[in-house]
Image (tube, rainbow, N blue to C red):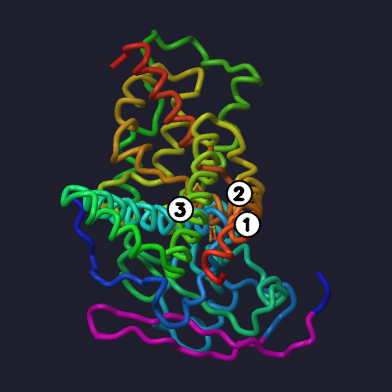
């Protein structure tokens, strides 16, 4: 990346503490720019040098835990993976950092992900088998593994869930992540619960709530195509019903 | 039961979040909804107009004459546009359901838009004398 000829970068960050504030506010900080710095680095500068009360989530700082998903300059991004230089090169002159939209704010950039996790748990995201455990492991051919390759890359950051108009308007909808994960288990050659999984997903709280808007696909920092998986669920649900499986 | 810890949510309409960059797929969906509403609105209107025949042929003819005005011709042209987009994008969605083109959705949307514009231009040429002539 070419060097940027700037000394400071203006950071606008969303602040709200439901216990004391009645209205949210936007704080503006001028943060020293260091080559290669990320949005998370900028937030750390505020936390350590300017205002210790700023709350945000992070853990791995290398794009694998999914804790730092935020709404940065109009797009869903991982703060730890997003270089300030990259945002500027998109034509922005300041950093705008918001919590994930359409989720309740606990404090500042920290949102309540309860519904996201409950929905994930509801689809039983673990292997279900009907055969005796093998001595060592359940093997998969490379071709079988390829079917789930894309979907195991999910880091459960919640961006897709936060971006989906069907989630905003349907409090019951399990969301793109849970649907994509359902598909991931349905096509997994080692899993034996495909029929139950389809039964759980093939209704208006599940796959049929998806209107192929593709916001989840745009939001995903791991470039996973959830819509493709959800469409796969719809097709399989119809096929199963035609076969009379339900 | 899910109960939020806090009740406040950031919404896209909040200051500074705007402009949320609406991308191809969401435009396609918004346009689909809007054109759908236009078509439903027309359908209701159409049924009302046609049912004027219940009051006899005279009333029906009078209603039809009243509708022979540039403003209604312009409305019909809009209807053609809405129908074109709604139908073409409907095909796009059906293809998704069949598993075709999900990963090329943006190109498909561009195609839908291009065909709609071409069709609309042709319809506009036909309607031109009715509106302005
Ligand atoms: S599918 Fe992508 S956007 Fe959704 S939770 Fe997983 S990594 Fe995040
Ligand atoms: S801190 Fe783990 S993904 Fe950013």
Mark 1 to mark 2: distance in Å? 9 Å
Residue A202 position within the rendered picture, expressed as x and y whole percent measured from the top left? 33, 30
Precedes in sequence: disc 1 or disc 2: 2
Q: Secondary structure at mark 1?
A: helix
Q: Secondary structure at mark 2?
A: helix
Q: Is residue A161 above or below residue A57?
A: above
Q: Is residue A22 left or right of residue A227?
A: left
To which quarter of the image does residue B102 belong?
top right
Look at the image and give the residue range highlighted in magenta: A4-32
Q: Which mark, residue B32?
A: 3
Q: Residues within 10 Å of mark 1 (few under 14, many from 20)?
A: some
Mark 3 to mark 2: distance in Å? 11 Å
Quarter, ligand 2:
bottom right
Q: Which mark, residue B117?
A: 1
Precedes in sequence: disc 3 or disc 1: 3
Q: Is residue A208 above or below residue B26?
A: above
3 vs 1, front mark: 1
Residue A199 position within the rendered picture, expressed as x and y whole percent measured from the top left? 30, 25
């Amino acid at each position: 990346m070419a060097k940027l000829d700037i000394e400071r970068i203006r950071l606008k960050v969303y602040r709200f503490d439901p216990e004391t504030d009645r209205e949210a506010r936007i704080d503006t900080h001028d943060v020293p720019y260091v080559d290669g710095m990320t949005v998370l680095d900028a937030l750390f500068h505020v936390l350590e040098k300017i205002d210790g009360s700023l709350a945000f989530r992070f853990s791995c700082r290398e794009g694998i835990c999914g804790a730092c998903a935020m709404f940065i300059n109009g797009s869903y991004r991982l703060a730890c993976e997003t270089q300030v230089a990259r945002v500027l090169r998109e034509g922005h002159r300041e950093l705008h950092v918001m919590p994930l939209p359409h989720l309740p704010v606990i404090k500042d950039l920290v949102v309540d992900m309860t519904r996201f996790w409950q929905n994930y748990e509801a689809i039983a995201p673990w292997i279900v088998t009907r055969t005796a455990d093998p001595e060592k492991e359940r093997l998969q051919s490379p071709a079988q593994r390829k079917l789930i390759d894309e979907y195991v890359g999910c880091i459960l950051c919640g961006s897709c869930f936060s971006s989906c108009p069907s989630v905003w308007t349907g409090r019951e909808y399990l969301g793109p992540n849970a649907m994509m994960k359902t598909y991931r288990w349905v096509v997994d050659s080692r899993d034996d619960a495909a029929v139950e999984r389809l039964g759980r997903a093939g209704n208006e709280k599940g796959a049929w709530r998806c209107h192929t808007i593709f916001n989840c696909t745009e939001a995903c920092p791991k470039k996973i195509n959830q819509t493709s998986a959800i469409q796969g669920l719809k097709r399989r649900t119809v096929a199963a019903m035609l076969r009379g499986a339900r | 039961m899910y109960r939020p810890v806090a009740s406040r949510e950031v919404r896209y309409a909040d200051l500074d979040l705007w402009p949320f960059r609406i991308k191809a797929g969401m435009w396609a969906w918004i346009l689909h909804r809007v054109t759908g509403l236009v078509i439903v609105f027309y359908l209701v209107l159409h049924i009302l107009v046609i049912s004027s025949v219940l009051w006899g042929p005279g009333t029906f003819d009078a209603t039809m004459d009243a509708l022979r005005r540039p403003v209604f011709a312009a409305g019909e042209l809009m209807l053609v546009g809405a129908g074109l987009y709604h139908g073409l994008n409907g095909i796009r969605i059906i293809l998704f359901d069949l598993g075709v083109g999900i990963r090329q959705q943006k190109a498909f949307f561009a195609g839908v838009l291009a065909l709609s514009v071409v069709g609309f231009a042709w319809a506009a040429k036909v309607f031109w004398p009715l509106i302005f002539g």
